[in-house]
Amino acid sequence: MKFFVDTADTKEIADLAATGLLDGVTTNPSLIHKSGREFLDVVKEICGIVAGPVSAEVVALDHDGMMREAEILRKIADNVAVKVPLTIDGLKTCKKLTSDGTMVNVTLCFSANQALLAGKAGATFISPFVGRHDDVGFDGMELIADIRQIYDNYDFPTEILVASVRHPIHVLQSAKIGADVMTAPPAVIKALFNHPLTDKGIQGFLADWEKTGQKIG
C-alpha cells in the first residue's frame, strides 16, 4: 500500500520523505489555509520534495471554472494530481483531464455508487473519507471493502486512496482490505512506529550496553 501524507507543512513532508516511506502528498484548501502561505507556492515546493503524486484541489464548482484552475495547477509540475469534488461537473472535469494524461484525484467520496461513477469517469484516484463516514454512524471500512470489490469486478485502474484516516487501526484495516493508497496526517503515520515492546527493548539494550563501558567509534 502506498503512503501519502495529508498536510501542507513542507517541513513535515521533507522529514517523512527522508524515511523512504512517502509515496505522495495530499492537500486541500483547509490545509493550505493552516500553512499561512500562498497556495501555488506551497504546491510547487511540495512537488520538489516528493517524486510521487501531489494532490492540489480546485475550488471552482462549475466545469469551466475547474478546467481553468486545473490548467494552472497542472503546469506547476508533472507530478501534480488535480483534485476535484465528486459532482457531475467534477466528473466531467475528471474525464477531460485524464483523457489529456493528467492525474486526477476525485475527492469527498462517501458511497460505493459514487466510487463506481468516478471509476467510469477515469479517475486516477478515488478518495473515500473513512473518518468522516465513521463520524455519522457508518462503517468507513465497509465502504472501502465495497469499493475494492466493485473495482476488482470490472478491472477499474482507479486507485483507492483511503482518506480522512484518524488512527493506525484505519491504516491496518485499509491494508488488509487491499486499498491501493492511504493518506494520513503526519502524526498518524509517525504513530505507526510506536509499540511499547519496541521502546522497552531499546531501553533494555541501552542499559546492557552501558554496563559494558564500551563505545562505538
Image (cartoon, rainbow, N blue to C red):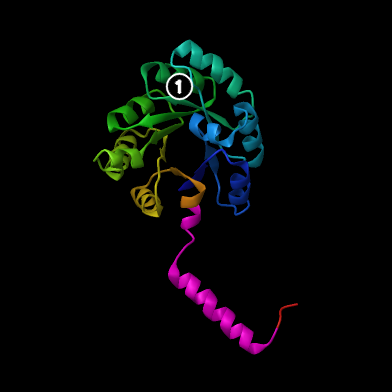
Q: Which residue is mark 1?
A: 94
Q: Nearer the viewer, residue 97 or 215?
A: 215
Which residue reaches farthest bottom? Answer: 212
Residue appearing at x 34%, y 35% in the figure: 151
x then y, percent, for residue 94:
45, 21
Res. 158 visible in picture: no
Give the secondary structure at mark 1: helix
Marker count (numbered)? 1
The image quarter in which residue 54 lies:
top right
Which residue reaches farthest top? Answer: 64
Q: Nearer the viewer, residue 103 or 154?
A: 103
x then y, percent, for residue 57:
50, 27
For the C terminus, the image quarter is: bottom right
Characterize the local packing of mark 1: few (<14), some (14-19) or many (20 or more) Cα atoms within 10 angstroms: many
Q: Nearer the viewer, residue 61 or 37?
A: 37
Dominant SS of magenta comes to helix
| Looking at the image, residue 19 lies above or below residue 133 | below
| Looking at the image, residue 67 lies above or below residue 214 | above
Which residue reaches farthest left? Answer: 137
Residue appearing at x 48%, y 75% in the figure: 200
Q: Nearer the viewer, residue 2 or 76?
A: 76
| Looking at the image, residue 195 lies above or below residue 214 | above
Res. 88 visible in picture: yes
Horizontal arrangement in the rendering, residue 180 relative to residue 43 (left or right): left
Inspect the magenta stretch and tell me whether residue 204 lies in it. yes
Segment colored magenta? 189-214
x then y, percent, for residue 120:
36, 24
x then y, percent, for residue 104:
49, 27
| Looking at the image, residue 116 lies above or below residue 19 | above
Residue appearing at x 26%, y 43% in the figure: 139
Residue appearing at x 30%, y 45% in the figure: 141
Identify which amino acid the numbered label 1 is placed on. Answer: Cys
